Image: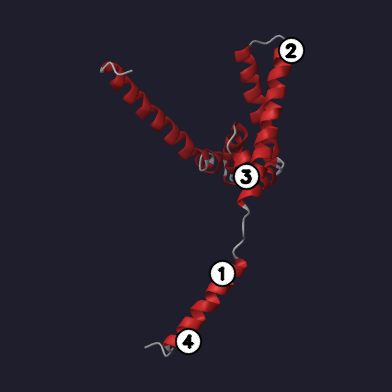
């Protein structure tokens, strides 16, 4: 045996559980959802401003959307490079990570972090460590859904 009595083990387990409770951060779900809503709303408002500005300069809807995406991605990459976007994402949670800006951050952050390892083994190998699964499963799920749609169309259901 280990030399400890059952009572000592229970006391030790109780102390450990109390310690875990003390060091585990508590999260307020409603506050986190509010922060995500505000952050995502600000990003979307900036995107709408870009769309409206492009439209005011005479660009069509498709071209305005392309410019909006490019500008939002550029801003996200610049803010990631200046180490500002991680703070925004830390505060805003999913509100900063879900839009196209979060995806751009997910690609730029590993590229910046691993650039010291070189172009091939650093940036080339590590750039999609965060965004790679999103791209992979996004393409795979769209392929599966397309296949299901095609089969349903062959059967005359759709």
**Residue at (43% x, 89% y) in the render:** 5
Q: What's the mark number on residue 20? A: 1
**Is the residue 38 above or below the residue 156 in the image?**
below
The picture quadrant where one finds residue 48 is top right
Category of crowding for the residue at label 4, using alpha-carbon neighbours closer than 10 angstroms: few (below 14), some (14–19), many (at least 20): few
Q: Secondary structure at mark 4?
A: helix
**Is the residue 155 above or below the residue 88 in the image?**
above
Q: CA distance from mark 1 to mark 4?
A: 18 Å
**Residue found at the far left of this picture:** 155
- Quick check: marks 3 and 1 in contact, CB under 8 Å? no
Residue behind mark 3: 33
The mark lying in front, picked from 3 and 4, is 3
Q: CA distance from mark 4 to mark 2?
A: 75 Å
Q: Secondary structure at mark 1?
A: helix
Quadrant (top left, top right, bottom left, bottom right) of the N terminus: bottom left
**Residue at (60% x, 50% y) in the render:** 29
Q: CA distance from mark 2 to mark 1?
A: 56 Å
Q: Earlier in the sequence, mark 2 or mark 1?
A: 1
Residue behind mark 2: 56
Residue behind mark 4: 8
Compared across the picture, whether 101 is left or right of 124 comes to: right
Category of crowding for the residue at label 3, using alpha-carbon neighbours closer than 10 angstroms: few (below 14), some (14–19), many (at least 20): some
Q: Earlier in the sequence, mark 3 or mark 4?
A: 4
């Amino acid at each position: 045996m280990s030399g400890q009595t059952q009572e000592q083990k229970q006391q030790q387990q109780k102390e450990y559980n109390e310690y875990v409770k003390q060091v585990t951060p508590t999260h307020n779900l409603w506050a986190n959802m509010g922060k995500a809503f505000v952050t995502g709303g600000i990003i979307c408002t900036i995107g709408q401003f870009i769309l409206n500005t492009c439209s005011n300069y005479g660009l069509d809807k498709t071209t305005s959307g392309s410019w909006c995406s490019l500008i939002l991605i550029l801003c996200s990459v610049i803010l990631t490079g200046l180490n500002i976007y991680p703070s925004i994402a830390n505060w805003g949670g999913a509100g900063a990570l879900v839009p196209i800006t979060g995806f751009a951050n997910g690609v730029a952050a590993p590229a910046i972090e691993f650039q010291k390892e070189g172009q091939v083994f650093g940036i080339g190998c590590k750039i999609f460590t965060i965004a790679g699964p999103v791209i992979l499963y996004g393409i795979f799920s769209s392929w599966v859904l397309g296949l299901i749609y095609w089969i349903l169309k062959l059967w005359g259901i759709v």
